Image: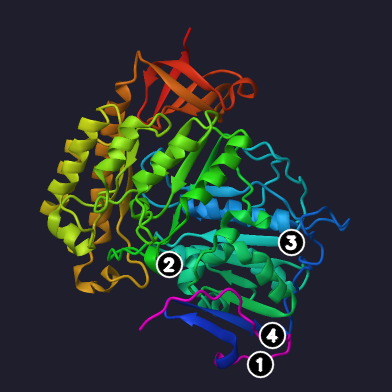
Amino acid sequence: QVHLIQVVELAVLHKPTMKISDDNLRVGSHTGQNALIARSKLKGLGVTPQFPDLTGGGNDGNGSTGVKKKTYQILTAGCQMNAADSERLAGVLEHSLNMEPVATQTTTTTTTTTTTTTTTTTTTTTTTTTTTTTNGRKKKKKNDDPDVVIFNTCSIRDHAEQKLYDALGPYAAKKRAGSKELALIVTGCVAQQEGEALLRRVPEIDVVLGPQYVPHLKNVLESVEWGHQVVATAPMIHQEQHIMEDNFAKPIREHTVKAWVNVIFGCNEHCTYCVVPAVRGMEQSRTMESILKECQGLAEQGYKEVTLIGQNIDAYGRDMVPKRKFADLLHYLNANLPPEMSRIRYVTSHPRYFSDRVIDAVADLDKVCECFHMPFQAGDDEVLRNMRRGYTFDSYMRIIKNIRTRAGSDAAICGDVIVGFPGETEEQFQRTLDLMEEVKFDNLNTFAYSPRPNTEAALWKDRQVPEEVKAERLQRVQKLAAQHGSERSQRYVGRTVEVLVEDSNPRNPNQVMGRTRQGRQVFFDGNLDELKGSLVDVKVTEARTWSLMGEKAE
């Protein structure tokens, strides 16, 4: 008989001089482990890296202690989940530790509303001195280095680990020199994937933090102050009070109009190319009530749009008792959110589990936007079987047909595709182009396959496609995707569309930028201070590949 238990607290012997032992320092399972390692001097230098006093100088949420605030910087790469995690990390640092940001967060987010891309861009380690974020919060303008530097990493693309090591170099050098009390933290998917190996490669790192431990950052830092390095990558069950109800875990949002809202963590799929199940853990759905509470709080703060996020959002609720469906969540939020919250988006769907009920919800519910993110990854059935995706060319096209029939031809369909998967022939690649021609995606994120650690496809050494072939196929996919993007943009010309104003045009300060309900960017003349967060009717005058130009309708 098997019982599922939840470990709420774990007592660990807590001495700065304790000896390393697998018996008393490690907990966890085969997919990760936690380690509390006594900090030692660096080999060859005789220097013990210094760590700033962080937990003693913070506050308990009731006010400042009068101690000079410490500063932090978060450098983020990857998907929407990482962007949301960075906001939660900032929430812990500011609410719980009374810290302030030293520079603008650099966030690279792969979404279905950006241009086609070949790789996931990683951030640099250069500290900027801009003084405001997109949400208008003032940031400390100074030349001093931050006291805490957090790398929120992505492991989807090739060479992710080496790029992280390169970025860590300047900060590690400062710690080796002993001239700066600096907390160096690595979190995100590379942290979960590499674990203690990161400490062996870069011993100056203080914390290796799996994404599931983001709300517990303060507790982890307390252990570091006692003289330890901490690896926290063991699986854990998410607790609602640590997701949102604990004030210290409330995110510091990077925008005032739109916000990410996690609805399901982890992924139970095991696609042969993907690292997500290994680094994000098993699926864990949040309750509908807690999701609504977070969205209502955002509406009270003036937010107009929420994007519900999950690695496999169509799996929402299947781990609950009684089971729920994602369509149930959409109906629940649409019925209970106030009028001020005008738009609901979501990512990312899985064709294997996608339901017609979701299509009907998008078609019938006034707040849910007409945009479907439906990654197809490949067009050939054999390649899809080797990927272990669980659908075929024909079953995918049936979904597209149902979307066009039930939600209308104006609904946006976006996707992801991988070229050069192991064993993919030219004939099989042509099926990918065939699928693109049939669908004509509004936006498409494109990737050349790269072997990832701990994935099945990475072991197929004799089936790997040459790099030059992958590059050539990627160019063909991108060219066709741009052609389709331009065609889909043309349908807006001469029409008046509803645009939610988000920001200014970074290339023209006299213009603002917003999005249609289908997710298309629209630029038009206007004052951001007057229009930000407003729904504006805009007449489209020009169509570009991935965006539109227009003017306010009379």
Please name the residue that numbered disc 1 is placed on: 19
Q: Earlier in the sequence, mark 4 or mark 2?
A: 4
Label 2 element class: loop
| Residue 408, placed above or below residue 447 | above
The region drawn magenta spans 1-22
Q: Residue drawn 34% across and 55% down? A: 315
Q: Quadrant of residue 296?
A: top right
Are the two marked residues, 1 and 4, in contact with CB atoms closer than 8 angstroms?
no
Cα–Cα span, label 1 and label 3: 28 Å
The three-letter code of the residue at mark 2 reads Gly
Please name the residue that numbered disc 3 is placed on: 147
Q: Quadrant of residue 455?
A: bottom left
The three-letter code of the residue at mark 3 reads Asp
Question: Which label lies toward us, 1 or 4?
Answer: 1
The three-letter code of the residue at mark 1 reads Lys
- From this viewpoint, which residue is outermost toward the top? 554
Q: Local crowd at mark 3 within 10 Å, few (<14), some, or many (≥20)?
A: many
Cα–Cα span, label 4 and label 2: 31 Å
The three-letter code of the residue at mark 4 reads Ser
- In the depicted view, which residue is nearer to us: 321 or 257? 321
Q: Earlier in the sequence, mark 4 or mark 3?
A: 4
